[in-house]
Amino acid sequence: MTPNTNRVEFVIIFFACIILSISCEQSKVMPLVAGRPESCLLCHSEMQGFGVGHLPALIGCSACHHGQTIMRDKDEAHKNMLPVPGNLADAKKSCGDRICHPDFAQWVPKSLMGTGRGLVSVNRFVFEESTSPDGPGHLSHLGDSPADKHLRQFCASCHLAIPKKEPAPISEKSRGGGCNACHLNYSDEAKQQLTLYKKTEELPKIHPQLNVQISNRHCFGCHSRSARISTSYEGWHETLLDSSQVEKSEAYRILQDGRVFSKQPQDIHHEKGLGCVDCHTWRETMGDGTSYNHQEEQIEISCEDCHFTEQPRTVELKNLDQHDLKVLGKRRWPVRPTTFLKIRKTGSPIINSLIDSTRSAKLILKNTGEIKNLAPPKPECGNNFPGHERLSCQSCHTQWAPTCIACHTEYEPEGTSYDHVAQKEVAGAWVEYADEQSAVLPTLGVSGSTIDTFIPGMILTIATPQNNLSISDKKGAIFRRMYAPISAHTIGTKSRTCESCHSDSRAIGYGAGALIFKKLEMNVGYWEFEPLYEPHLQDGLPADAWIAFLKDSPTSEATRINIRPFTIAEQKKILAVGVCLNCHKNTELNMNRIYAKLSNRRLKLSPSCYKMAN
């Protein structure tokens, strides 16, 4: 924060306090804020802790909390009050007032975090209630089908529209709350006074702030579930252990909900101090007014936007739109950027970037103002290495991904469960039985035209009320063998090895096991696969596989319409390089001498080199 900024904020707060004290003197005169009565200040004038943008002397209390501000009587004044403003049901008349944040309040409910559209569509697709993983859907408007009841019980709590009903700081268990989910921050003193209020009903005098200091803690409540992005980013993988089985150890972490996580390598960006919002933009979280089907559609940022070798693509300050300027204006950094990196996908600015006097690109950490250098990719990355042009950055640099090889989901009509949409206990309960969970290198496949990372997201049987099956009777259950895309958020500086792609069964989609190259006469050989897991009763494939070994796989699916496993021709092409790697390991010498020119090298094989027969 610059000295000038400090002085301006001090002057604003000083005069605001003078105005407030004059208008509330001895509580005899009705306080006026912006020319309107604000009776809240007759009782709450001592409240402190606000950020500059939310000072009661400037906007009053009713701008957020509403109520009957011309009434002096407590009960009358509190009629129609919003105890917790910012919930999506009220956002348009609190945070979204026309002089505050009207566009954002319109866009957030349409965003994926506001609708859960992708969750709803994929879940219905898996339950065979729709023919596509795309389509309309909203977690606030679920029906009573098996798929929607499943969502009501398990998924709908991680949804911005779930109301925050009482004041509380953000924690690992936080869910919903609309604007509060990201922007609510309690100081230590505010927490202490809230705790005291709940015990004694003594009114707090320190108000929590609503600001842009969005920490990883704000994301954690929801994103430590499903793909486990928050936990993976910090270097933690969920286990099936009970907390009673784990001694206090740095190798394990017990969350507030009791789940036990084991220590794994953290993402390099987390290691360097980057928070979630240092990469992710306001458009990705709050939306831009467009209805997207899935996360990867709403995400605009990519690795290449910060890590590049060519001259930076830029946007000038004068060309920023009003929303970027408004978001940028909330930041109090030591430097004020005038030239920003441009996002390749959308052309939008990375507002926490700058181009210095030497034309070097830097990243500003949003919450601290710390400036980080941006490293270019290594020469062997992507387009610089023949045959790897289609690979995404994360296909090589993902260190591990959370996987669960098999699930069974069963409906118990005699049970009870909590309906997160209706906010009450209801009859009937879905029960999920998880199998082995692992932290391993992800499987590779094709997304559009890009080779990317995937996990066995939906290898499961579903016993619905209609098929009335138990876990021991799976023959008539719904069975799906679906892999799902994942951005694991476990990026490392080192790439996975060549062998981990070209001669690894899990990487190609066959599942865990051993790929063995059997040598025959005449310098010809063939690959043989020995799976780790037994064949599944439903389709005969190994329990964790996406596809069969060098055969067609009719049951292999994905949770997106533009995603597929490798074709047989692609598998053979991958394995052909694996043959070479049996002898010629991926040393720097061999990379330059052989693999950078592999197409030509194959035309001039030595007499001792082997080829694939299959």
Image: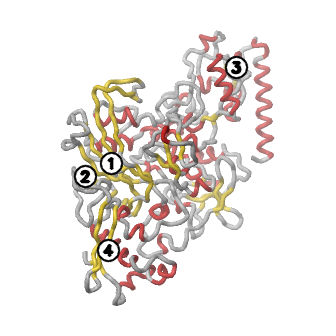
Per the image, the residue denoted by label 3 is 44
Residue 517: numbered disc: 4
Residue 313: numbered disc: none
Q: Nearer the viewer, residue 217 or 263?
A: 263
Which of the two discs, 2 and 3, labels the residue nearer the N terminus?
Answer: 3
Q: In the image, 288: left or right of 33? A: left
Contact check, label 2 and label 3, Cβ < 8 Å: no
Which of the two discs, 1 and 3, labels the residue nearer the N terminus?
Answer: 3
Residue at image position (46%, 40%) is 113
Residue 406: numbered disc: 1
Neighbourhood count class around disc 2 (C-alpha, 10 Å): few under 14, some 14–19, many 20 upward: some
Q: CA distance from mark 3 to mark 4?
A: 77 Å
Neighbourhood count class around disc 1 (C-alpha, 10 Å): few under 14, some 14–19, many 20 upward: many
Q: Quadrant of residue 421?
A: top left
Residue at image position (69%, 50%) is 369
Contact check, label 2 and label 4, Cβ < 8 Å: no
Which of the two discs, 3 and 4, labels the residue nearer the N terminus?
Answer: 3
Q: Position of residue 611 (x, y in %)?
A: 30, 81
Q: CA distance from mark 2 to mark 3?
A: 65 Å
Residue at image position (35%, 24%) is 426
Residue at image position (33%, 33%) is 430
Residue 536: numbered disc: 2
Which of the two discs, 4 and 1, labels the residue nearer the N terminus?
Answer: 1
Contact check, label 4 and label 1, Cβ < 8 Å: no
Contact check, label 1 and label 2, Cβ < 8 Å: yes
Q: How many marks?
A: 4
Q: Is residue 482 above or below residue 565?
A: above
Which of the two discs, 1 and 2, labels the residue nearer the N terminus?
Answer: 1
Depth-wise, is mark 1 or mark 3 nearer the camera?
A: 1
Give the color scheme: rainbow, by chain, secondary structure or one colour.
secondary structure
Q: CA distance from mark 1 to mark 3?
A: 56 Å
